[in-house]
Image (tube, grey):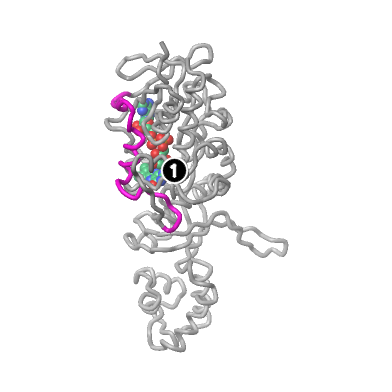
Amino acid sequence: MEKPIIIIGSGPAGLAARTGAGEMGKKAVILEKADRPSLKLLASGGTKCNFSNMLSKEDFMARFGRKGSFMRNALTLTFREWVSDFLSVHGIKTVLTDDFYCFPASGGAKAVRDAFCEGFDKVETFAEVTEILTENGQAAGVLLKDGRKIESNKVILAAGTSAWASLGSKKGLLLAEKCGHTIVDILPAVAPLHIKEEWVKSLAGVSLEKAEILLYEEKSSAGGKKKVKEIWKTRGNLLFTHEGLSGFSALDMAEEAGKMCLKNTSATILLKVFPERSREETAMLPALYRKEYGNKLVRSLLAEREKLPRSLAENIARLAECEEMTGCRLTAESEKNLISLLCDGIPLTVEKTGPMEKAMAASGGVSLKEIDPATMESKLIKGLYFAGEIMDLVGPCGGYNIQWAISSGRLAGRSAAMDQK
Ligand SMILES: Cc1cc2nc3c(=O)[nH]c(=O)nc-3n(C[C@H](O)[C@H](O)[C@H](O)COP(=O)(O)OP(=O)(O)OC[C@H]3O[C@@H](n4cnc5c(N)ncnc54)[C@H](O)[C@@H]3O)c2cc1C
């Protein structure tokens, strides 16, 4: 009798893998170690589930860095339109926020999870896989923690990573390693930034609706002059924390900043508090203060006229050395400092990213060199497939990782079903 395909993990990758296998008329069972299925998916997007975004396929892949082209086959089969149509068939309309981020219009992450579960047997919970069985380089089944052995020549490993430790684990990575796969170092990505400057931490709780962060490297040019080389730029809301910075723009920066911290022990960023104003508009502020608001303190103007949080305004004035200066008393030196901080950005030092407990996704994972991108099958073990975050690919914040989990999962499920015996 034909044995069901075994899927390890009930995240979006595992659920989509079962859907893919089902489309090909094959049965698959999902084994989930937790007490409930899809816990990370349920928590995603603040439980609202930002499942994709409006980028083109090419731009989407580019946001995963150099390895992004690995995703081409999976995204060609399953991209945003497929997910939206799939949800629509299950009665869930989708909406965009900021004309870019895709969410279910109602029901949040639970509605997405339920859509993927409709028509299938229940996910088997409390079912931790402790070993993937192989025979002569071919998948042969799994062993479970409760001692059971389930046989199948098709196993899909969709067990995620240890990011957000209370909902994730490294157990799947260990299973892959035991099968002989190389695991690229796991690091926190989509995670808060730890900032060295103490004043940033003193602002814990303060937020900006829109800020821009620029990660840069200083390069010396031929004349000995230092040039700024932009590495990564993100824009979105920003939250000051006891460790440094969080919120969309910081989380989005974490992977690149983390890599640079590993290379150089720290990374330098510029924080722009008026990302939507032109340089000209911002640079004329000191002149305007002098002319129109001569008797007011610059720090009060930054807070009251420019609507910056007061504690941030005070720190910008302190950094510009005009803490106690009024508009008409602003010195040339302070004016120059202020323009630089507001136009070029406030320089900050990232010491590290993370911790893993607060990372929404992790970089690293099963080496892509050992996986066939056309099928998601292991190049080392026949009949073993990978899906989702467990592979060495991670996107930034904004619907990238769930889309990738669904795309790779559906491809893995369909591939595994192709010649299932
Ligand atoms: C708080 C939070 C918010 C997020 N928000 C978003 C968002 O809005 N948009 C977005 O794109 N991404 C978001 N992410 C990231 C996204 O949720 C993950 O990238 C995605 O869930 C990865 O899917 P996956 O199926 O590969 O792995 P997971 O969702 O991690 O699922 C893997 C499953 O495998 C199970 N498992 C592990 N080992 C075993 C084993 N040995 N035996 C049996 N089962 C096992 C785990 O318990 C888990 O349920 C968020 C993450 C977090 C933590």
The stretch in magenta equals: 98-127
Q: Position of residue 407 (x, y in %)?
A: 48, 37
> Mark 1 is on which residue type?
Pro
Choose top left, top right, bottom left or bottom right for residue 229: bottom right
Residue at position x 38%, y 85% in the image? 296
363 or 118: nearer the viewer:
118
Magenta highlight on residue 114: yes
Q: Which residue is mark 1?
A: 188
Residue shown at the point (33%, 60%) measured from the top left: 204
Q: Quadrant of ligand 1?
A: top left
Residue 391 image position (x, y, % from top left): 49, 34
Beta carbon of the mark 1 residue lies under 8 A of ligand 1: no
Residue 290 spot, x, y in % from top left: 46, 87
| Res. 221 image quadrant | bottom right
**Residue 373, above or below 218:** above
> Of 64 and 416, which appears nearest the observer?
416
- Secondary structure under tag 1 reads strand
Left or right of residue 182, residue 90 in this image: left
Residue shown at 49% from the left, 51% from the top: 54
Q: Position of residue 248 (x, y in %)?
A: 41, 54
Judging depth in this view, the residue of 323 and 374 nearest the camera is: 374
Going 52% across and 57% down the picture, which residue do you hit?
Answer: 233
In the rendered image, the quadrant that contains the N terminus is top left
Can residue 405 be seen? yes
